[in-house]
Image: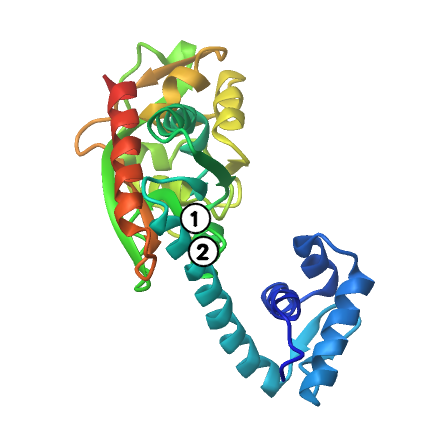
């Protein structure tokens, strides 16, 4: 078994995670034949197949399932060694892999980057924008150090560090500026524009409007808050956006913004990281800087 390399483990881990040779190869930045050769080599070392190869996807064998769990633990342990090395270097330096959800990244993260690089000149930020589910998965796999998300995430292996709360506001066409602000029940009857599935902000908006997880088919969807606001400006409907997005998203759209009646919808934004991460103290410093940046923008 001494012939098993970290390359074998990383490639098999990618294949187990994606369930497809092509997608796994893309994630590893290698060709599909090269990945296939490495997996076959690993199987020959073990003396038993790890995957059942199909025309469209692969399926892990019984050994493959058990092996995948052990490989995940090994790769996490290796990542922890790197964390320990960074910890011994003193003040936060080296690379910091930080994830951010799309409804926070464009509005807050530039100021966070400015403050972090000013406070820690040696830091090498490696940002990753993705929806919450993907960020949690990458944290658990050791591919991210921390992430800025909407809380709670309720993942027992992750620590949650609340940073700030912010309200949602209603965006509607300019012609509606003088009209009464609709209630949450009234919004349910209007053409509501929402982010596509997978965004936590979508789920929060649906909850406020008392719409279940299976909304009407005629519900309009967009891939970004920018798209939603521009659609509102074109007279297609109304939408909700977080307060931090107002200045950026409404400056070039023919829309009006209104605060909703109490109890107003809101979200809690925070940072999450693995409970086992030895960089926890440094990550709390990062969290304080994120909170400072949010407070400065809200002032």
Instruction: Say whether residue 4 is left or right of residue 254.
Output: right
Q: Count of labels shown? A: 2
Q: Give the answer, above or below, for where 248 lies relative to 194.
A: above
Image spot of residue 43 (x, y percent): 71, 82
State which quadrant residue 83 falls in: bottom left
**Secondary element type, mark 1:** helix
Mark 2 surroundings within 10 Å by alpha-carbon count, few (fewer than 14), some (14 through 19), many (20 or more): few
Circle 2 sits on which residue? 82
Identified at 61% across, 70% down, the residue is 9
- List the single residue furthest toward the right: 33
- Tell me which numbered mark, 1 or 2, is placed earlier along the sequence: 2
Which mark, by number, is residue 132? 1
Name the one closer to the observer, 149 or 283: 283
Q: Nearer the viewer, residue 143 or 239?
A: 143
Q: Compared with residue 142, is residue 48 higher up or lower down, i.e. above or below?
A: below
Image side of residue 206 versus residue 49, left or right: left
Give coordinates of residue 149: x percent, y percent. Answer: 36, 43
**147 left or right of 267?**
right
Q: Which mark is residue 299?
A: none
| Quarter occupied by the N terminus | bottom right
- The x and y percentages for residue 107 are 41, 25
Q: Residue at x 30, y 60 (%)?
A: 275
Q: Residue furthest bottom?
A: 47
Density class for disc 1 (Cα within 10 Å; few <14, some 14-19, many ≥20) is many
């Amino acid at each position: 078994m001494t012939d098993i390399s970290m390359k074998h483990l990383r490639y098999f881990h990618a294949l187990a995670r994606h369930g497809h040779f092509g997608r796994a190869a893309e994630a590893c930045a290698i060709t599909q034949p090269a990945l296939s050769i490495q997996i076959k080599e690993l199987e020959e070392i073990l003396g038993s197949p790890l995957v059942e190869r199909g025309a469209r996807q692969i399926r892990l064998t019984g050994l493959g399932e058990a092996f995948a769990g052990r490989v995940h633990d090994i790769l996490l342990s290796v990542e922890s060694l790197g964390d320990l090395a960074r910890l011994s270097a003193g003040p936060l330096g080296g690379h910091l892999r930080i994830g951010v959800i799309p409804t926070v990244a464009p509005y807050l993260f530039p100021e966070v980057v400015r403050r972090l690089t000013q406070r820690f000149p040696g830091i090498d930020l490696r940002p990753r924008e993705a929806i919450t589910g993907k960020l949690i998965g990458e944290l658990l796999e050791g591919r991210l150090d921390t992430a800025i998300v909407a809380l709670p995430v309720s993942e027992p292996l992750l620590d949650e560090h609340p940073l700030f709360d912010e309200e949602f506001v209603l965006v509607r066409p300019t012609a509606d500026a003088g009209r009464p602000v609709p209630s949450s029940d009234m919004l349910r009857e209007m053409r509501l524009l929402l982010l596509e599935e997978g965004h936590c902000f979508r789920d929060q908006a649906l909850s406020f409007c008392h719409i279940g997880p299976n909304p009407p088919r005629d519900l309009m969807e967009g891939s970004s808050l920018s798209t939603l606001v521009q659609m509102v400006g074109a007279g297609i409907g109304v939408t909700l956006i977080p307060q931090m997005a107002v200045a950026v998203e409404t400056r070039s759209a023919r829309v009006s913004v209104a605060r909703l009646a109490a109890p107003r919808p809101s979200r809690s934004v925070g940072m999450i990281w693995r409970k086992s991460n030895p960089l926890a103290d440094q990550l709390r410093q990062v969290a304080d800087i994120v909170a400072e940046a949010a407070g400065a923008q809200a002032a």
